[in-house]
Each structure stands twice: as structure tokens, then as C-alpha cells.
Image (tube, grey):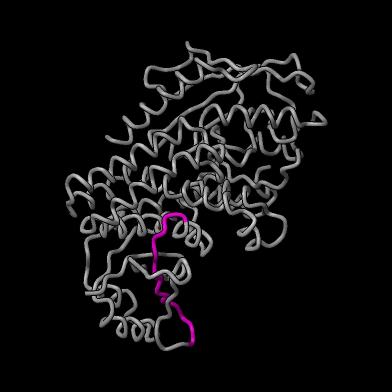
Amino acid sequence: MAENPDNPIDEEIERSTGMTRDEAILAQQDRIQKEVEDTNPLVSERLPLVVLKEEYQADPVYSKKIEDMYASFPYIRKTRGDGNCFFRAFGFAYMEKLLTDKAELHRFKETIEKSKDTLIALGFPSFTLMDFYDTFMEVVNQIEEKPSLSELLATFCDQGMSDYLVVYLRLLTSAELQKEADFYQNFFEGNRTVKEFCSQEVEPMYKESDHIHIIALTSSLGVGVRVVYLDRGENQRANHHDFPEGMPPQIVLLYRPGHYDILYGE
Amino acid sequence: MFSNTAMQKRLQKELMQFQQEPPKGMTIDTESVSNTLTTWIVHIEGAEGSLYHGEKFQLQFRFSNRYPFDSPEVMFVGSEIPVHPHIYSNGHICLSILTDDWSPALSVQSVCLSILSMLSSCTEKKHPPDNSFYVRTCNKSPKKTKWWYHDDSV
């Protein structure tokens, strides 16, 4: 049903904005989203890590931790905070690796080719699925034929193309969770099923990723990812964790509560 | 530009698929489909053995140029609106895949099937408890409502 209709402040909202409460909330969300879009590209250029410290000038805990990261990770590439940032950061960082690693590219291409049949076998409707698969493969083939960083960046910054790639990564994540449902079911409290989790938290766009998304996607593709955590924790330095457990990391992501960016060593 | 043509390409494909293999009890009103494909009307019949057997309804779909990343706007239109605990008498439908749980891998067809299944599993024809307040105060578009999905059992 429609949310909480008897709130006494509704009239106040309507008087000041000329909109009903729901409309006012959605309009404000749209405004915030628009502002985020205007100031942040989907994937940024590679930037010196000092840009990150500038965001936390008045914050000694973060400043200190960021300074300590300079030596290991001098560069960062930011992604837009739209709820798809993990998938976009992962997708870009990994495909950037593929530009210079022919053997890995070959392995990845085979993995993706096989994934389509797995998805269809799991009951994803093939005719919507194929759209996303085809576009994803187009980009993989493009990397093979013409490994250009600027073109890869342009692809990831084009909203339409970029979102197609995000959708396919979301579907791969969902497929892995469903395929290994017996294992992943242990992560859920209460009686939420893996299938419900996938249709509520994995397949829809703009839903943020948690550890479980990362474990599933990295396991499904066999791609190691190191996540460096920058938070307000007691520890002096930023912690990190590798996904899937024990696999050497091929790319490094930076996690700040609610957001993922890409980090670079030398 | 990309999203616009991608949206039309995708809808074209969905339209063909729907016309070639329409799900049981559903037809697309081809005259309703606008040139730009942004509005469709689907005729839907209550399934046999359900409380709505023999009733005919019209579902209106509207697509933005961000489709399929943004969900379609879907509501019942015309003179017959199903009396159902999750369907308001102005045609608005409370169904999570139409907003929060929409995924680009869903389609017009899967939405129609979910709505038909929602009708078929209904055990008592009644309006939602907040129907009269909602219908009086809501926006014309159901996408402008913040829905609260409280019950999947009906």
C-alpha cells in the first residue's frame, strides 16, 4: 500500500512545496541525483590520491589513513555514487587490466561465453538476457581488436553502454548466488531466500553491493579483487580483504562506507 | 542518443516477441502503440479458476527513454479496474517489481505475467485499506508514489 498516509507533517510539506509528501521526497531525490550526475563522471580519469585527502581536510582520522596509503596506492579512479559503483569499478578496473593481458583476456572471453548458457539454464528470459550479453561481448571484442584505454573509458562513461555492462555483471552475480544457493543461504538471516535476495538486491539497478555480491561475482569469474577499507575504525591504517578468499588480487578497490572507487599501485 | 535508440530497439523486440507468442489471456492493442513505442495498452483476461475469470481489463504501459534501466509506468485503465487488495480503484498497482525491485532483465511480458498471477492468487475481492485516502491524494503517475511493500502473500 502507499506509505504511511496519516503523517501530520504532510500538510506542512504540501503548503511549502506545492507537492504531496511522496512527490516532494521523490523530487528531492531526483535533484540530489541530478547534482551527483553533473559533478561526477561515471568513471573518472586516473587521479593522484591527494584528491581524496582534499575531501577530508577537516578530518584527522581519514587524512592520516589516506596519507599512509600514498606509498602503496599513489593513484585513484573515482566512480559515480549511484548504487552501481561496485560493478562499474570492478568492470572498469578489470577490463583495463585486460587491455594488456592477452592470456587473461582469452580466459575471460571463454568464461563469458559459457555464462550465457548458465544464465538461460537458471531461467533468465533469454530474449532480454541476450541484449545484455551481446553488448558485453561487443566490449570484450573491442578490447581484443583495439586495446585503447581512452575508448574503454569513453564506453564506461556513456550511460547507455555503461549500464548495459553493469546489468550483465549483476546477472552474473545473481546466477552465481542461485547456482550455489545452498552455500549462500547461510549468509541470510530470517527466511529470505537466495532467489528473493537476487530479485530485490542484485538484479535491480542502483542497489548497493555488499560482501556477498563481491564474493559471488569474483568467484563466478575467477577474478581476484583486493578491497581496501577506509573507515573510522580504531586501527591506524586502512585494512584490506581479498575476494574470493585466498586468490591473488588482480585489481584493487577502495571502499568507503557506501562507495567503491579504484586504486592503483605504481 | 544511445539510450533513446537502445530503448526503441529493445521495445521493438519486446513488441514482436509479445505478438508472436502472446501469453495466455493477453493481447496487445496494436492501435494503442504509439509511433515512438512509448505507450502500449495490453488487454488481459482474468484466468480460469480465479476470482476474476470472465473479467477483462486493460493495462497501460508507459516507457521513459531510460527504459529498460528505469521501470515502465504500469496501471490499469478504462472502465474496469480489478477489485483487489493491492490495486487502487484509480488503477494504480502496488507491486514491488514496478518500482524498487524492477530489473532491466524483466520485460513487458514478465510484468503482465506477475500481475495476472497477483490476480489469480487473490482469495477475497476487496480494495486496499487506504484506498479512498490514496486515490484522493496521489499523483496521476503511480511512479510518483513511495510504495511500502508489506505483504507478498496476496
Q: How many marks?
A: 0
- Horizontal side of A266 relative to A121 (left or right) equals left
**Quadrant of residue A76 in the image?**
bottom left
| Observer able to see residue A21 | no
Task: State the residue at coordinates (65%, 56%).
Answer: A182
Residue A162 falls within the magenta-colored stretch: no
Q: Where is residue A177 drawn, in percent x and y?
A: 56, 53
Q: Residue visible at 62% across and 44% down? A: B147
Outermost residue toward the top in this view: B31
Q: Is residue A251 visible?
A: yes
Q: Nearer the viewer, residue A171 or B28?
A: A171
As rendered, which of A146 and A159 lies closer to the eye? Answer: A146
The residue drawn where x is 39% and y is 74% is A228
Q: Position of residue A117 (x, y in %)?
A: 47, 39
Where is residue A161 drawn, in percent x and y?
31, 42
Q: Quadrant of residue A121?
A: top right
Q: Is residue B56 above or below residue B96?
A: above
- Identify which residue is drawn at 29% across, 56% down: A104
Q: Nearer the viewer, residue A181 or A61?
A: A181
In the picture, the quarter occupied by the C terminus of chain A is: bottom left
Range of the magenta residues? Answer: A220-234
Side of B130 relative to B27 (left or right)? right
Assign the N terminus of chain A to one quadrant of the image: top right
